[in-house]
Amino acid sequence: MNTQQQDLIALTGAGVYRQGRWLIRNVDLHVKPGEIVTLIGPNGSGKSTTVKCAIGLEKVDEGRALRKSDLSIGYVPQKFSVDATLPLTVRRLMTLGAHYSTAQIEDALGQVGLSGRTDDLVQHLSGGELQRALLARAFIGKPDLLVLDEPVQGVDYAGEAALYDLIGRFRDETGCGVLLISHDLHVVMAKTDRVLCLNGHVCCTGTPQSVMSSKQYSDLFGARAAESIAIYRHHHDHTHLSDGRVLHADGSVSDHCHKEEEGHDHAR
Amino acid sequence: MIMLDDFFTRALIAGVGLALIVGPLGCFVVWRRMAYFGDTMAHSALLGVALSFLFDISMTLGVFGIAALVSLLLVFLQKKKTLPTDALLGILSHSTLAIGLVLVAFMAWLRLDLMGYLFGDILAVSKGDIALIYGGGCVILAILGLTWRPLLAASVSEELAEVEGLNPQRSKLIFMLLMAGVVAIAIKIVGILLVTSLLIIPAATARRFAPSPEMMALLSSLIGGVAVVGGLFLSLYYDTPSGPSVVVAAMLLFVLSLSMPSQRGS
């Protein structure tokens, strides 16, 4: 992958202030073409907010949010539901934003295993099926950047591996950038180039490759799944206090979590 | 046109025209859960009527202006996030209606047929009204047609539409102005208190038989048309007020549709 390429999106020192508190602060995030970046972090740690800033759905109150000009984005939002009164078939869902040929639609839905459900109402899909339909929808326009907010929620482990596999293949074929939020604090897609752990700020960042090779996890999830899923093990050595300060393991309190620029211990 | 000289024929032509226009817009009102918003716009129309008498301007223009203003005010207040939307709508809806009624009372020289504005007076429709309905209706439907795809996408998910560059805020604004236009045109026919019913009931009836959003819009227009014709004949034979009769006919069609097998098992 060419590291000299221009960033698709770049957050620099980004902060979002809402209802009297910082949802995120001092977040740096860059995604280049062909790169897969995964965000993890506990509930309310600002993963979705970060992603929304990156794609322009949310304005930053501090720092900068830049996007490549004419960037096309395939997006799977965290929450998606269609009102029961709207007769929307899966086929029609695919062409909501732009027109695609029947062949393109069948192909996109076939890739996520929804070939037989083209003419079903979106409301009749199960949670996992809806996620797959949304993924197909994000793929179909061959975007420069895929932004997936918990794309495998409601999908079982085997299906999860298959979907991560598909996302990886799509990246390999089109060279698009991928920014995804994992629904699990410890499980990320194995092809991830970089993992960012958020907790209001970037707590730590690293590659998941080291843990992917560990045999115990392939035993745990099966060899097939282990090809697509990696465990990103890390532990937090500090607690965030309600006033925004940080309580460290040794009992000291400071304004930042990186007391001496060392961050977390990462398990290998 | 001899035919247009008959008041009942004029009522039929005007009513059916109105039903055709409101069908597709009514679908969006249902999909976007904006029924109460439609009500608020309609209620504010009485203020528009009062102001148009006060400043001696066209009533259609006055109603359109106030309805548009109220919808913009709502968008502004929603952004401030001080109160939930339904509370905001309640405040806007009833204060504009009340201010309208107070203003009418102040204008002692004005002998206003309040009942006519509240419940409509379809049998007093003039040739000019028909021209307004069909002319204005063509403009409204043309604009709706042009903005259909982004508006539908925004109705499904504003976030997705935004990311895909479809500018949902613009579609929303255009839709609100179209609604203001429909209210301005519809007031005379069904009246302030019943406008929303003509938007919602045919759309809700069409839902059960429509395989796609576009078909639902079309069906909703047709069902509205049948309701208008049925309601007017009801009104003619039983000497009932025309606006409420149309709504009763629409309601009967809705109830009837519940007993029929739907297009899909839903």
Image: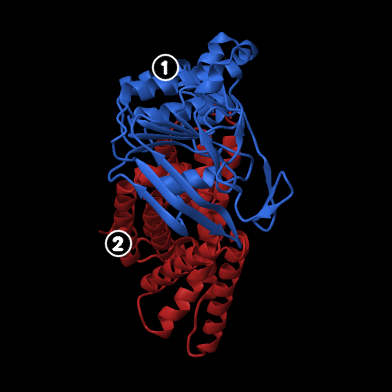
Left or right: A155 with respect to A8? Answer: right
Asked whether A244 or B144 is in front, the reply is A244
- Horizontal side of B185 relative to A69 (left or right) equals right
Which dot, 2 or 1, sits closer to the camera?
1
Quadrant assignment for the C terminus of chain A: top right
> Residue at horizontal 54%, vertical 88%?
B106
Number of residues whose C-alpha sits closer than 10 Å to that of mark 2, classed few (under 14), some (14–19) or many (20 or more): few
Chain to which the residue tagged by mark 1 belongs: A
Q: Which colour denotes chain A? A: blue
Taking the image as shown, residue A198 lies to the left or right of residue A240, namely left
Circle 2: element type: helix
Which three-letter amino acid code belongs to the residue tagged 1?
A: Gly
| Residue hosting label 1 | A110
Q: Which chain is red?
A: B
Question: How far across and down, in percent of the image, does residue A24 sit?
Answer: 55, 51
Instruction: Check contact, mark 2 vs mark 1: CB within 8 A.
Output: no
Using the image, name the chain to which the residue with label 2 belongs: B
Which quarter of the rendered picture does the N terminus of chain A lie within? Answer: top left
Residue at point 27%, 59% (across, down)? B2
Q: Residue at x 36, y 28 (%)?
A: A140
On screen, residue B259 versus residue A12, left or right, reads right
How far apart in space, not on screen, are marks 2 and 1 (Cα)?
A: 51 Å
Is B73 drawn above or below residue B211 in the view shown?
below
Give residue B54's position: percent from left, percent from top: 43, 85
Which numbered tag is attached to residue B131?
A: 2
